[in-house]
Amino acid sequence: MTPSIARAAAWTAVVLTASGAVLAADAPAKPPQELRLGGIWMVKGGRVDVPAGQATSADLYSFAGTTRIDGTLQGDVATFAANVLVPGTVDGDVWSFTEDVSIDGTVTGGVRAGANSIAIRGTIGRNAMVLANKFRLDPGGRIAGSVAAYAGATTIEGAIGGSLLARSGKVEINGPIDGDVDVRCDELSFGPLARIGGRLTYSARNEVAVPPGMVTGAVARGPDPGAGATPDAAAEEEGSGFGVRALWRGYLAVVALVAGVALLLFFRPFVDGAIERTASGNGLGATFGIGLVGLLVLLVAGVLCVCLLQLPLAAGIWSALGALVYFGGVIGKIVLGLWALAMLRRFTGRDAANSGPPRSAWSTTHPVLALVVGVAILFLVTLIPYLGNLVWLVVTVTGMGAALLQLRGEKTEDVLPDAAAT
């Protein structure tokens, strides 16, 4: 098994099995607690069932020991449980992070699951993406869309209407697949019922016998997993990866510009107050420190709420953290642009008399110009592996700290003494 897949499968099995065991142990101790709010149905502890012949219209969020759907659930399912059993019908998507998942009935939407063991004997109406120790699509099972499987062992004996992407230690295919197949594994084998309607691309360490007529399209074998790539192949892959990274970063830069302009249009006084707190070295140090503390506190609080199954509070904390990170990042980009422009003025001699970035730059520079400059700088820097992520983190945390200080209405001098005082 390739090292990355082995580690992923092992950690998945250990973490999900342990969490499932905790939930299962908690199940008999007390009856489940339920909360229904509009079309949302939350359950924690014990066991949750949708009985056969019963139709329930809601999106189910389950932290129960066992989640079983024998009837019909008209909505999505998100589960963090020991076991998930679907002999009935889910008229929506299934998101599951559990110990074991077994789907014998029908899921009209897609499936996203991480578990120790995942078995599908029923019908999936759309795509499926799984991360597991063992994944099986049994005979009689059908996935109408495509499948992405990251597993220790992948067995396909049912039908797949789309394509198959598999990264596994062992892959067995003995069923019809209408689309392309892309497999990287240690051991690959085909059964007598295997049919591939598209192309077959595979990399395996064992000798693979591809039966004549099994594959409609072309067959291509890549290098064995773990084998060193040729310099040309490595350069091509690196160049392709850089292009995708640059395109993605460019998209994020455009989104940041739009979000920043919207933030300035509707919350200009708040943004002005926040960036004013960073107009000195002391201000930068204070805002970065406050932002780092705020980030850690919210992360720890969110994890604790999830562990204690306080779902509404956890949702509120994670939502607040997401908003703070995003809009703090926008403020941080404006601050980065202001400091860059101030340094440029000093370098060109326009502010040579000042020992630090002049506060006049904060009042004479339009924040939209600073936003454009900050976004452009961060776009270029984040194209550099590792260093770019570090710079993004520092800029975002600094903006978060400025936003937190502005929300509290405190001055940076109240948090960190002025340099002259030291």
Image (cartoon, rainbow, N blue to C red):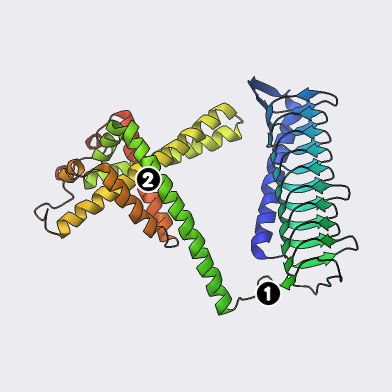
In the rendered view, tell whether residue 1 sits above or below residue 412.
below
Within 10 Å of disc 1 (Cα), the crowding (few <14, some 14-19, many 20+) is some
Which residue type carries mark 2? Answer: Leu
Q: Residue furthest left?
A: 353
Q: Residue furthest right?
A: 192
Labels 2 & 1 near each other (Cβ < 8 A): no
- Is any part of residue 183 visible from this angle? yes
- Measured as percent of width and height from the top left, residue 303 is found at 55, 38
Mark pair 2, 1: CA separation: 43 Å
- Measured as percent of width and height from the top left, residue 149 is found at 71, 54
Q: In the shown orientation, is residue 370 left or right of residue 381?
A: left
Number of labelled discs? 2
**Which mark is in front, 2 or 1?**
2
Q: Name the residue tied to disc 2.
A: 257
> Which of these two is toward me, 305 or 189?
189
Q: Name the residue tied to disc 1.
A: 223
* Screen quadrant of the N terminus: bottom right
